[in-house]
Amino acid sequence: RRRAELDPAPLLPRAAPTAAGGLVLDVVTVGGTVEPQEYYLRTAQGALYRLPEVAHPWARAFVASHVHALHHGQKEGLLLPCTIEFGILNGQFLAAAKNPPPTLSV
């Protein structure tokens, strides 16, 4: 993605503690930029969000896992699209990928 496309994107809204129900989104894209390093996600509804810095390690690992499965032809290992719950658990950022939502097909 070009940096100019991401600049106007709002930060992902702060999520409630996961035990109380975090922010749940149907996600179709997770990606990033190199310089400066930023990560973003796009929802099934078309909304684009920049991820806060605390979410960057999760985003890097998520993208790496998805790309690995894609390049090795492991369709069952593909992570997107999926529903992701974002929240805070024990004071730490949490992002939990769920099964693909019924409105999206893999």
Image: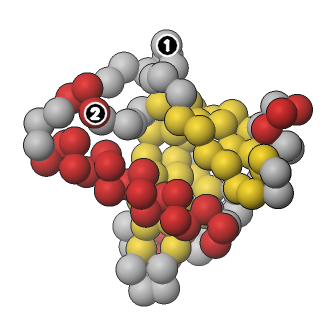
Q: Position of residue 92 (x, y in %)?
A: 75, 57
Q: Which image quarter holds the C terminus?
A: top left
Q: The N terminus is located in which quarter?
A: bottom left
Q: Which mark is residue 102?
A: 1
Q: Residue furthest top?
A: 102
Residue 44 numbered mark, or none: none
Question: Is 72 above or below relative to 98?
Answer: below
Establish if 70 lies above or below 57.
Answer: above
How many residues crowd around disc 2 within 10 Å: few (fewer than 14), some, or many (20 or more)?
Answer: some
Percent position of residue 47, x then y? 60, 46
Return the residue nearer the eye: 1 or 67.
67
The residue located at (30%, 35%) in the rendering is 78
Going by the picture, which residue comes out furthest to the left? 72
Q: Is residue 4 left or right of residue 105?
A: right
**x 32%, y 56%: residue:** 64
**Colouring mode (rainbow / by chain / secondary structure / one colour):** secondary structure
Q: Is residue 71 visible?
A: yes
**Type of the residue with mark 2:** Gly
Regarding mark 2 in the picture, which secondary structure is present there? Answer: helix
Quarter occupied by residue 9: bottom right
Q: Which residue is mark 2?
A: 77
Closer mark to the observer between disc 2 and disc 1:
2
Residue 30's spot in the image, x, y percent? 45, 52
Q: Is residue 43 above or below residue 38?
A: above
Left or right: residue 88 versus residue 45 is right
